Amino acid sequence: MSNSEELYLRQNVQVEPLIDQWYAWPHLIPPATAARNITERHLKIMDSYINAPQIHANAVKNPKMLGGPFIDYGGKRVDEIRALRDRIKRERSDLIELSAALGALDNMLRETARGYSLQPLYEKVPDILRGYVELTYDLNNHPSFRLIEPLLYRSSYYDRSQQSVMLTTISSDDRPFVLSTPRLESDDSLHLHLPFESPVIDDLFRLKSAPRPWHEIKEMLAIQDSQDGLLRSFLTSERPPAYSAYTGSGVRWRYFGHACILIESQGVTMLFDPVLSYTYENGISRYTYLDLPDSIDYVLITHNHQDHILFETLLQIRHKVKNIVVPRNSGGRLQDPSLKLLFQNCGFNNIIEINELEEIQAGDVHITGLPFFGEHADLDIQSKMAWLVRIGLHSLLFAADSCNIEPRLYQHLHRVFGDVDALFLGMECDGAPLSWLYGPLLTQKFERAMDESRRLAGSNYEQGMHIINCFNCREAYVYAMGQEPWLNYIMSVKYTEQSKPIVESNRLLKACEENGIIAERLFGEKEILLQQKPVRSSAVSVPVPV
Ligand SMILES: [Fe+2]
Ligand SMILES: [Fe+2]
């Protein structure tokens, strides 16, 4: 490798974004949710591992414990976990205090606020939270608070120095589960202490398609000589294949796995819930980074779950993205951090917030936000939206994990928007209990039966069929099921033929087939071309599987 040789970043270099060496899923970024997760998830898991590593090693091997709070290092590396825990306790003491203060505030309101003026209670707000919260009642005198999130991001509680990215080579789909296993350094990992907003991250990923000489890359990443060999192992002089954009007159959509779908039509590109596999041979054919256009007009986010907002993918494509479209939510609720602020504070520009029934238009393309009910354990969370895409006379509805808990919603939507050609619907209808994701935010003990009853569940057979029938869909695609093995590290689901999501979605596919509706549970990859529709009538849009 000569010094002047032009080098690319290999397509199978895994880049995990980390905060305190824990995988940066969205709740680890806003200061308040990060604080609660540090004390109520990370420190507890690490303490438990240090005390009984073998219990964790056994639990990780037990399929019934999948997704549980167990560190996946085979009972080893206890000293490193201890060192990480001690460092977090030392360097994150302010967030640890913030977490306690949020708990104390909740308690104070519960015990003191009785429907009388909240004004005298401001001086009882824990000192470090004063000025960052407004106290409120709902109309039934239930007290609560809202966080002034933009101020918290502009305080020492948002500490970019704890953000980093870790590079390793990936050649299989197996990775430890992100919510329970922190990432430790190893001889084959390059740990770059860069905040997510750093333009160096964009330059790094531009190397996937635009090469640069060795000395520039080394300088850009500020690598020491001792790491030359490792960095060189991530680079190649081999030019990746060029992307060929869709130039037809209709619509092309491609399924990349889970809820990630790329639409190209009339020069407009849209990417929903970006989640990419890296490029390596591992049995199942899949679209990857190489199958993305150089520029993406709109990235659209359906909701704030870690399988739908994946910074690992979003950081890779940030330099390609013109606009990122998110559901509007700025209520300051602990459980519902603002998505706009989340992305802004991670270096994304041109964030468009959309309210329910608001629309974006680009030429012949109309994108409308539709209400997304359910799948959030009945918490007051606004950061969820289904996206209705109308291109000419085609219409596609990306409902993600929407749970049809109120069929009347879709009757109203049909009255306003009419028929929909194709529905994309998640049917993960088992769903984890509330505490699995939101437990660290709760400050009171929660009855197990309540927890079990409030689940992160998507639509079942009846709920799904109702949406299909309501919109007179001609095509129905079950997606967002977490079935692709390269998603195990964020989803932690493994289905059998008896699993409820499979049983229910099989029923839905069968019923569709019996009713002449094209239907499929998407897996791996899929491409469909929709020919230009001449007129809106009962004329069938013709999906052409490729
Ligand atoms: Fe979800
Ligand atoms: Fe999901």
Image (spheres, rainbow, N blue to C red):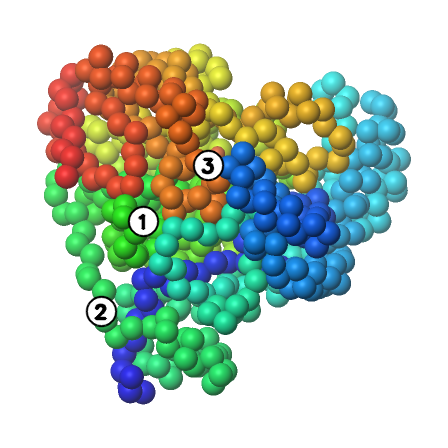
Image marks 1 and 2: residues in contact by CB distance under 8 Å: no
Side of 62 relative to 507 (left or right): right
Q: Is residue 139 above or below residue 194?
A: above
The one of 295 and 459 positioned closer to us in this rendering = 459
N-term mark: 2 or 3: 2
Q: Nearer the viewer, residue 194 or 456?
A: 456
Tell me the CA gap for discs 1 and 3: 32 Å
Does any atom of ligand 2 lie closer than 8 Å to the CB of label 1? Answer: no
Front label number (2 vs 3): 3
- Where is residue 152? Give x, y as percent: 67, 51
Q: Residue at x 33, y 17 (%)?
A: 507
Query: Could you tell me which residue is drawn at 77 percent across and 28 percent down?
Result: 143
Mark 2 = which residue? Answer: 239
Mark 1 or 2: in front is 2
Q: Are marks 2 and 3 in contact (CB under 8 Å)?
A: no
The circle drawn on residue 297 is 1
Which residue shows up at 22% across the image and 29% down it? 394
> Residue tagged by mark 3?
493
* Above or below, comparing residue 331 to residue 538 in the picture: below
Label 3 CA crowd tier, 10 Å (few <14, some 14–19, many 20+):
some
Q: Tell me if 74 is positioned left or right of 33 in this view.
A: left
Verify CB contact (< 8 Å) between mark 1 and mark 3: no
Can you tell which quarter of the image residue 115 is in? top right
